Image: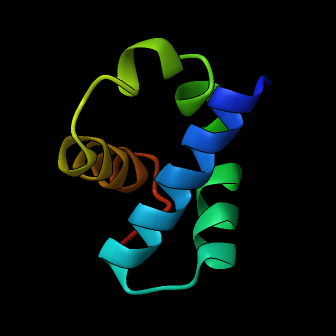
Amino acid sequence: MDYNTLNFTIFCISNVARALGIGQRETYHLLHRAGIIDGYIVPCYDTLHTFSREYVVDDLIDLMKKKGALA
């Protein structure tokens, strides 16, 4: 993972945590266990980083729900 991808992953974790009202550590674990970091955020970085913060956060929360990481 290069610097830009790592920075974007941290950006995603921070903003999803803020939107859900939970800690960043918990958000990281939820995303990681659901396979969203290695299976979606990192491989799709080139496309995802071009979208707005709101779009990315909503997209990730929807994916977390689909994967059962959120009720």
Query: Which residue does the image show at 64% across and 29% down from the upper left?
Result: 5
Image quarter hosting the C terminus: bottom left
In this view of the protein, can residue 5 be seen by the observer? yes
Image quarter hosting the N terminus: top right
Residue 29 is drawn in which quadrant? bottom right
Q: Is residue 43 left or right of residue 33?
A: left
In depth, the one of 44 and 10 nearer the eye is 10
Q: Position of residue 53 (x, y in %)?
A: 27, 47
In depth, the one of 20 and 51 nearer the eye is 51
In this view of the protein, can residue 34 be seen by the observer? no
Q: Is residue 46 above or below residue 17?
A: above
Q: Position of residue 47 (x, y in %)?
A: 38, 14
Query: Which residue does the image show at 51% across and 52% down from the upper left?
Result: 11
Query: Which residue does the image show at 54% across and 59% down from the upper left?
Result: 13
Residue 7 is drawn in which quadrant? top right
In depth, the one of 14 and 64 nearer the eye is 14
Query: Which residue does the image show at 30% across and 52% down from the upper left?
Result: 57
